[in-house]
Amino acid sequence: MIVRDAAPGDLPAVAAIYTHYVLRTTVTFNTHVMTPREWTQRYTTSVAEGPYHLLVAEREQQVVGYVETQRFRPKPAYDRSLELSVYVAPDEGGQGVGGALYAALFARLAATEFHRAYAVVALPNDASVRFHERWGFVHRGTLTEAGHKFGRYLDVAYYERAL
Ligand SMILES: CC(C)(COP(=O)(O)OP(=O)(O)OC[C@H]1O[C@@H](n2cnc3c(N)ncnc32)[C@H](O)[C@@H]1OP(=O)(O)O)[C@@H](O)C(=O)NCCC(=O)NCCS
């Protein structure tokens, strides 16, 4: 398995992984499927032109997971904070893909001015909670019933890691 910067040609595979979690799970609060145009726009304005990241894990020429960084909040004082999103293909979990993505990402972030990384985890998501704790994230608080998806309210936990 290799981890590399995503190219525009990876966006359909990245979108396919994310769409699974949008449509079938509550691990993301998104409820609509992002269009190819939305993926391209996000990639162009925040990754290709910087300063954010989209890395893919590839095994046998198949994208099996990805991690992206995005702005944490809009206001300028948040410039040095970012939010992480990591998604592994549904049949590829628990095999080190997420860990390989985070290892590569944190190596890159070490050379940047980013200061804090946040994972915003919709609950319940035991795999993500354990995964982030294993990667040194600290639980900073949980908002109760902040989300509503598939007819029920959902809590969301904030995990923080110093960079
Ligand atoms: C969370 C996720 C990214 C972890 O990636 P992964 O490739 O499965 O994780 P790894 O194989 O690298 O495992 C690293 C650690 O994560 C934890 N973990 C991974 N899968 C787990 C599971 N099913 N249950 C509990 N812990 C799990 C473990 O602590 C594991 O370390 P260990 O095996 O030494 O105990 C992946 O499971 C995933 O994509 N889940 C669905 C999407 C999602 O929830 N994304 C995060 C949104 S906040």
Image (spheres, helix red, strand yellow):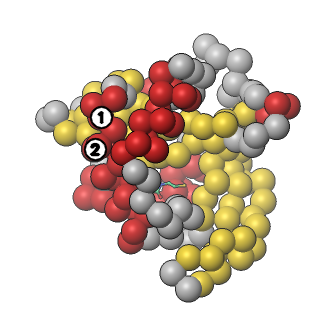
Report the front residue among 97 and 121.
121
Q: Position of residue 139 (x, y in %)?
A: 72, 54
Which quadrant holds the N terminus?
A: top left
**Viewport quadrant of the C terminus:** top right
Q: Tag 1: Cα neighbours inside 10 Å, few (<14), some, or many (≥20)?
A: some
Residue holding disc 1 = 10
Residue found 85% across the figure and 31% down from its top: 77
Who's the residue at 53% across and 62% down the image?
Answer: 30
For label 2, the SS is helix
Residue count near mark 2 (Cα–Cα under 10 Å), binned few <14, some 14–19, many ≥20: some
- At 19% from the left edge and 39% from the top edge, which residue is drawn? 62
Asked if residue 15 is positioned above or below residue 75 in the image, the reply reads below
Picture disc at residue 13 = 2
Instruction: Answer with the quarter of the image where residue 137 lies.
Output: top right
Is the Cβ of the residue at disc 2 closer than 8 Å to that at disc 1? yes
In this orientation, does residue 127 appear? yes
Query: As rendered, which of 134 and 153 lies closer to the eye?
Result: 153
The amino acid type, in three-letter code, at marker 1 is: Asp
Do we see residue 99 in this rendering? no
> Which numbered tag is attached to residue 84?
none
